Amino acid sequence: MGSFAVFPKSLIIEPTINCNRKCPFCPRTNYDARKHGFMEMGLFTRLMDEINEHRGRTVHLFRRGESLLHPKIIDMFEYARPRVDDLQLTTNATLLSRKYADALVRLVDFISFSIDIPSKFSVNRDGDDYERTVENIEYFLSKAQGVRTQVSMVLTDHTEAEIQQFHDRWKSSVERVRVYSQHSADGHYGSLPYDRGARRTCMKPFSEILIYYNGLTGRCNHDWNGKPLGDVSGRSIREVWEGKAYEDLRVQHKTLQITDETCKHCDSWYPNMVEQGTGYLFEGAAEQKTPVVKDTAL
């Protein structure tokens, strides 16, 4: 616990902050959604070249926006593919045209589709067309040989009774059916509506870095608008990762003396990098449903 990877094992790189949906449970509702921007290709290629020097890493090309909105998103995946060992994408699939699907199916190692059951889709997903979105997903899945696949929904007071229906709809189509607990509803990123018990050291500061579209860096996948910890626009990832801000954050988590304004309100800490401890997971042929206190990191 006292040590950390000399280079992040997991890197979340945000192609864009823009999104084409206004889902009511999304943490985007807690910050100025008027922010817009795309990562420049020059910055992106430099980041990928540095990552290429450290094999065995996972890169998630998504964060606060819908990555498929980036006009050069396929170029990004094409450039990243030979430089990254595990390349992942999460998408709402509304923009997943056959052209995009045909390209991405040979570029990603893991893909997760954010969707709901039909009766809640138009409300939870800001009025989009459920059948068309499902067609997009099913077309991709029909081509997805060797790609790890997941669908996910969000657990709220209004959706808990529909988990089984969601699972039954997708269990034979994907490897993982994931139900994420709604978080950040009170305005604190990563906060949950229930008590997880005694806080434990979060392993994210020891293994993961978040890079926003503009080069500023954050804590992890639950940092939506916290004070930046660095800037890779003018420094290397490793220089930022080994900097004082991240060093101080690791000490806080190691000692559980957490003063960081983002982390201290977060309930979504990861006691290890395999299981987090929130939501539900149905995985593989066994169709195992894990309870709310068991979860995986993806």
Image (tube, rainbow, N blue to C red):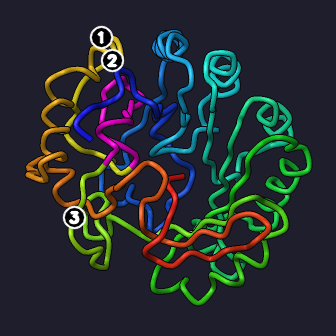
**How far separated are the C-alphas under marks 1 and 3?**
33 Å
Q: Nearer the viewer, residue 122 or 276?
A: 276
For mark 2, what is the residue? Answer: 232
In magenta segment, residue 85: no
Amino acid type, residue under disc 1 in the picture: Arg
On screen, residue 72 versus residue 32, left or right, reads right
For mark 1, what is the residue? Answer: 235
For mark 3, what is the residue? Answer: 199
Amino acid type, residue under disc 2 in the picture: Val
Q: How dense is the environment of label 2, judged by Cα within 10 Å: few (below 14), some, or many (20 and up)?
A: many
Nearer mark to the viewer, of 3 and 2: 3
Disc sitting over residue 276 in the figure: none
Contact? badges 2 and 1 (CB < 8 Å): yes
Horizontal and vertical percent position of residue 198: 21, 70
In magenta segment, residue 216: yes
Horizontal and vertical percent position of residue 156: 47, 79
